[in-house]
Amino acid sequence: MESSDNRIIDRILNDAREEAKAIIKEAKRSAEMLLEKQKELASHSAEKEVYSLLKRAENEAAVIKGRVTTDIKRRAGWMVLSEKERLVTSVLNEVKNRLVNLQKSEEYLPVLEKLIVDAGTVLDGGTSKLLVS
């Protein structure tokens, strides 16, 4: 009887081992499937995050580009105004110099007379007072 008891015990042990192997195999398969699903979810989540970061970076770049463009336009405007001011000042200085030189020449009186006559014509004639130094 002992040998039949041993056989029954051996059979029970073998069945238990086989069942344990099957359970372990199923657990590994289940773990691998779960791991694969988690990888897919992580990948999908990472793609969403990358897309979000990319959009945010594009928006920030557009804002910076707008600021830089505005700043460049403002600076260019100031440069144009500064250059215009320099040119006007230069022309006024040249006119002053020419007038000073003209006062010292023989052409001064005829030019002055012509300017007085032209001014009178523009003012529709009439009586006017002229102050000259």
Image (spheres, grey):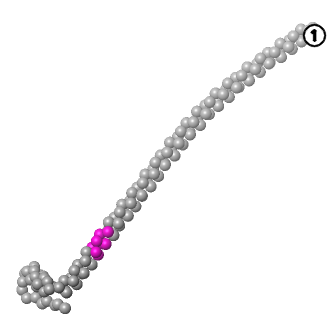
At 14% from the left and 83% from the top, the residue drawn is: 107
The percent coordinates of residue 84 (x first, y second) are 29, 69
| Screen quadrant of the N terminus | top right
Q: Reply yes or no: does residue 84 show up in magenta.
A: yes
Closer to the camera in the image, 93 or 127: 93
The percent coordinates of residue 99 (x first, y second) are 21, 82
Which element is circle 1 on? Answer: helix
Residue 112 visible in the current orientation: no
- Judging by the rendered image, the residue that carries numbered circle 1 is 2
At 11% from the left and 84% from the top, the residue drawn is: 110
Q: Residues within 10 Å of mark 1 (few under 14, many from 20)?
A: few
- Residue 54 is left or right of residue 126, and the answer is right
Closer to the camera in the image, 125 or 25: 125
The percent coordinates of residue 16 (x first, y second) are 80, 18
Q: Give the range drawn in magenta.
A: 83-90
Magenta region, mostly helix, strand or loop? helix
